[in-house]
Amino acid sequence: MTRSILPRVSPPNYQWCRAQVFFITWLAYVGFYLTRKAFAVAKIELQKEEVWGITKTTMGKVDLAYLVAYAIGQFIWGITADRVGTRRVVLTGMLVSIVMAVIAGASTITVVLGVVLFIQGLAQSTGWAPLTKNIGSFFSRQERGRMMGFWCSNYAVGGLIASTYAGWAAQYFGDWRYAFWVPAATLLGIWILFIMLQRNKPEDFSVSFPASVDDSYRPTESPSEADTTDAPTISPYRNPVVLHLAAIYFFLKPTRYMILFWSPLYLNERLGTGTAESGFLSGMFELAGPLGVICGGFLSDVVFRSRRMPVCVIFFFLLAILLFLFNGLPANRIALGMGLLGIGFLLFAPDSLISGTAAIDFGTQKGSGAAAGLINGVGSIGAALGGYLPALLTSEDNVTDWNLVFRILAGFVLAAGLLLIPLWNAVPKEAANSETIDDSNEPSSE
């Protein structure tokens, strides 16, 4: 491929636009987590007889309602974002999420809470695929691993903040309902910022970019990406690599959502911690997330030359070992906190690479929303299993076999690692053709 001998220089206004979109899309997904984790923290109070006396089995059914809706939404909103753009989808979903959080906090019976969280799941699923497509429109493949590494820290940071924030709100106001209401009010402020700052693509900014400079920085698609289809939202569903990644993500996501939805209650049972402290300690899982996704993105770009899969395979095997041993750790704050940090570091790196960076790489910019939606939709079916697993393994006297829970999750992660090995050298077809990479044995991106 012929490369210009001139240095790559970007116009300041274009770089500013990229920074603005990076910030607001990152913040938007952090905001989604504020209303997503409220029920996980509220469980500690809701299980008390003087409050609702809700059992783990019932909690699991409520979680399942949310996760089924979340999985359904992933398949819908990725395609919708490819057709109508990120802005409309995310603004609508975020507003519905705020309203549902307010209603959840005001509910008085479990049935209403279950229905509201089902709708909340549909609203929450408007976030990932559309925002992934949005950020992919501003960054090229060569820089995407590192940039998506930083960007994908949003759901790690979001989970950390949300757990602590909801726990603090419930304890400060003395009522579990504020675990829903305070985050909803905060998300409303982010919704307003999103209206002001977000744009779908570089052309939507009212600035002009010198063609001689802009062409070297604007994320471009190869002719095969741009011209071979009039229905870009369909092609990712025929892409064998995208389908393979979706199957792998099915086995990874149960772990994240089991910890996301149940770790505050797990810590409460093992350590006797209160609502606020349990929420904070469970946030250790997400605290390691930003470091994990940044490290994973850097390794995939620099060490493995924009190949995403080697990092994922290595981290999967290490994560499986830690999950297998986790419930045997000493029952103290330091041991369990460090254990959750380790799980977060090893999980978030491959999670972000598969559901974010690789989805854009193999789905292409035009079909990245559909690709991300497909991968996350299939993964969310696995998440529903993970979210319901503790309830499934709870006896009639409300005692959960946590050791078996973590060992089943270890088996899922091990399966994901084994399934991913055949894709060790996979890169998008146009990248293999343009970078003197021998791709004779690599899966095609078409």
Image (cartoon, rainbow, N blue to C red):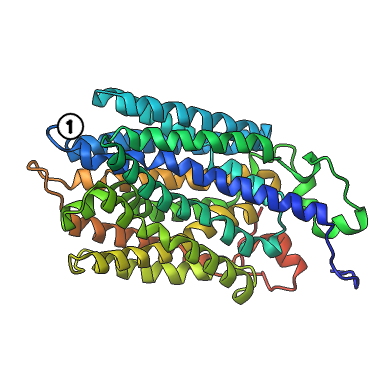
On the image, the x and y values in percent for residue 401 come to 15, 54
On the image, the x and y values in percent for residue 203 come to 80, 42
Q: What residue do we see at 43% from left, 69% from top? A: 315
In terms of secondary structure, where does tag 1 sit?
Answer: loop
Which residue ends up furthest to the front in the rendered image? 172
The vertical placement of 274 against 425, above or below, is above
On the image, the x and y values in percent for residue 259 come to 32, 53
State whether residue 383 appears in this view. Answer: yes
Q: What residue do we see at 56% from left, 43% from top? A: 28
On the image, the x and y values in percent for residue 32 come to 48, 41
Quadrant in the rendering for residue 288: bottom left
Quadrant in which the N terminus is drawn: bottom right
Q: What residue do we see at 26% from left, 37% from top? A: 174
Amino acid type at circle 1 is Val
The vertical placement of 421 against 396, above or below, is below
Q: Mark 1 = which residue?
A: 51
The vertical placement of 174 against 386, above or below, is above
Q: What residue do we see at 34% from left, 58% from top? A: 412
Taking the image as shown, residue 265 lies to the left or right of residue 131, namely left
Neighbour tally class for label 1: few under 14, some 14-19, many 20 plus, Cα within 10 Å: few
State whether residue 425 appears in this view. Answer: no
The vertical placement of 345 against 69, above or below, is below
Task: In this rendered view, identify the residue nearer to me: 58 or 372.
Answer: 58
Taking the image as shown, residue 65 lies to the left or right of residue 402, namely right
